[in-house]
Amino acid sequence: MPTERKCAGVLKTIRWGSRMEKLACLRCHSNKVKKHGRYRKHYNRYLCNSCGRTFNDLTGTIFEETKLKVKDWIYIIKEFAGTASKNAVHKESGINYGTVGRVVGIVLSSVEARQLLEKLTGDVIEIDEMYMSVGSKGTRQTERKPRRRGLRLRGRGTGDKDKPPIVGVTVRAAP
């Protein structure tokens, strides 16, 4: 596994360039930014002189607001990309199985979202889901006998249960 210092150096180079020429405020995009201390020992904090807000090297990435070290993220991603299972990564690294699953889910959803956004650039997308009840359980709405409430299946609605999911997607061209 790489060290946290190497991961921080690579991440800074990818984000800001080798000489920090791309460094700009993430909120107001101003170039009037100065170093403002450290974040987690290996990452820099920055202060924008235009808007007065602070940010760090991890702000705006998938590594933001996580207690897991970036080196562990890189290890999980590398092992999972090499067709290792979540359980195998959990046993090898000693990282909690749920944490490994969450990291894999975040990475996969960010990749899928980026691919979708590349295809639909400039379009307005609205997505919504609901779980429609197949029938009413009481007798107030219909003239039939009420159904039994004895379903033992757990989780959200599926086609096998009383509430199948209904997903609606609308794509409009941007004005």
Image (spheres, rainbow, N blue to C red):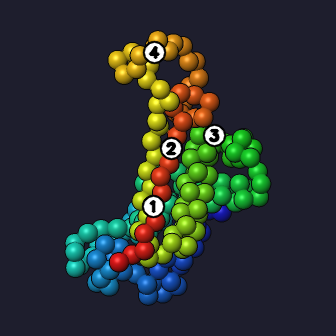
Q: Which residue is mark 4?
A: 144
Spatial distance from mark 1 to mark 2, Cα to Cα? 13 Å
Q: Earlier in the sequence, mark 4 or mark 3?
A: 3
Q: Which residue is mark 2?
A: 166
The amino acid type found where label 4 is placed reads: Arg
Residue 80 falls in which quadrant of the image? bottom right
Residue 173 falls in which quadrant of the image? bottom left
* Badge 3 vs badge 1, beta-carbon distance below 8 Å: no
Q: Which residue is mark 1?
A: 170
Q: Which residue is at a point 42% across and 59% down the rendered structure image?
A: 126
Q: Residue 67: x, y in percent? A: 48, 50
Tell whether 28 sits left or right of 90. Answer: left
Say which element carries label 3: helix
Q: Is residue 9 visible?
A: no
Q: Earlier in the sequence, mark 4 or mark 1?
A: 4
Q: For this rendering, which residue is in front, 134 or 56?
A: 134
Q: Earlier in the sequence, mark 2 or mark 3?
A: 3
